[in-house]
Image (cartoon, rainbow, N blue to C red):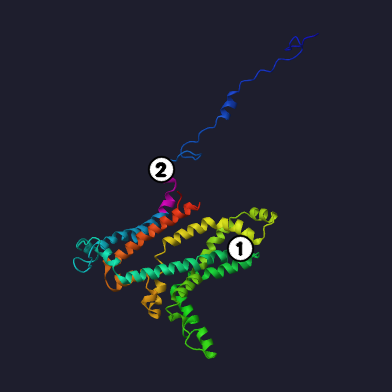
Amino acid sequence: MTLTAGSRPDGTRPPAAVEEPTAAVATAAVPRRAPRGTGGGAKVPFRIRLRRDRTLILMTVPVILLLLLFNYVPLLGNVVAFQDYDPYAAGNGVTAIFHSPWVGLRQFSRMAADPLFRSATQNTLVLFALQLVLFFPVPIALALLINSVVRPRVRAVAQAIMYLPHFFSWVLVVTVFQQIFGGAGIIAQVLEEHGRSGFDLMTDADLFAYLVTAQAVWKDAGWGVIVFLAALSAVSTDLYEAAAMDGAGRWRRMWHVTLPALRPVIALLLVLRVGDALSVGFEQFLLQRDAVGAGASEVLDTYVWNMGIQNGDFSYAAAVGLAKGAIGICLVLGANKFAHLLGEQGVYKK
């Protein structure tokens, strides 16, 4: 038997030796760390980020100054809720705050004993509950209806028509309703031609809550439609196709695919709406106050305006506004906690 080079006596070859990785291969296998300030997951120093984003920061400075000036600096004026503030007693305007006597919680005790405050709070809560039941589901239903339309041009036109009243002022909205449901409106004229007179929905105090709810629906439902349509656009069409292949009809696809996709948005808007429960509106009710009377149209916002601006009782009005804001914060926290229990994120995560 002839042995070849590198073979064993039995004729087999020994296993090839494992070559050591070259320096180039070893260097390529080890990932290099990106330099600081160039991305790649490394933390960018504040000095570099400041120089890099200085243009954007300068663009936001005017907005920040406006927010501080008109939204946060006025919060310091809530100190008058604990004073017997009189802008003309000592000093003038802001300087009178430093000379007004402290009364502690007397304004809050007065608020709790005021029957007008209780009436305004009751009207506010009733209107909030009514709008939550009758107004909040309307944008969801309209968004589902528009989303079911196949032709894009029809969807765009319907969406624009619904969103247009959002840009109307409350003066214009009340005027439109007056021309339709008022004593000299279209419906009253038609009824009068058929022998029935005396129709004037705009002065009916018993139906005032439903009237303002209808006005809010007509004015602001389009904004909610835009939000829910944006959420629906993010739903994958594969889910609908898979549900259709499993035999799900239109209603079952809406129940098992569409509504679960809208749950986070619904939870977020519901938390914000609950937190704004004590602010059902100001201009809308002030414009119709004389028509139906203060008993039906007085809410907390108009009550604060009447006590503070009309009557000059600034300390008491500040106490009512401060209490309303504190309750609103508690409602937001409670509603957000409830959203967490339902498995939704809400305004913020846990």
Nearest the viewer among 232 and 127 is 127
Tell me which secondary structure the magenta stretch mostly adopts. helix
- Place of residue 6 in the rendered image (x, y in percent of width and height, measured from the top left): 72, 12
Which of the 4 image quadrants contains residue 276? bottom left
Answer whether residue 207 is magenta in the image: no
**Amino acid at pointer 2:** Phe
Q: Is 31 left or right of 323, judged from the image as shown?
A: right
Q: Amino acid at mark 1?
A: Asn
* Image quadrant where one finds the N terminus: top right
- Residue 216 appears at what percent x and percent y? 47, 70
The answer to whether residue 114 is left or right of residue 281 is left
Q: Residue at x 65, y 65 (%)?
A: 151
Circles 1 and 2, Cβ within 8 Å, touching? The answer is no
Q: Nearer the viewer, residue 187 or 24?
A: 187
Near mark 2 (Cα within 10 A), the count class, few <14, some 14-19 or many ≥20, is few
- The CA span between labels 1 and 2 is 45 Å
Seen as rendered, the residue at the extreme right is: 1
Q: Is residue 280 visible?
A: no
In percent of width and height, residue 350 lies at 45, 48
When asked about the image quadrant of residue 115, the answer is: bottom left
Query: What mark, if any, has residue 324 been given in the picture?
Result: none
Q: Label 2 belongs to which residue?
A: 46
Identify the mark nearer the N-term, 1 or 2.
2
Q: Count the marks: how many?
A: 2
Q: At numbered mark 2, what does the secondary structure look like: helix, strand or loop?
A: helix
Q: Which mark is residue 147?
A: 1
Which residues make up the magenta segment? 47-58
Position above or below: 283 against 180: above
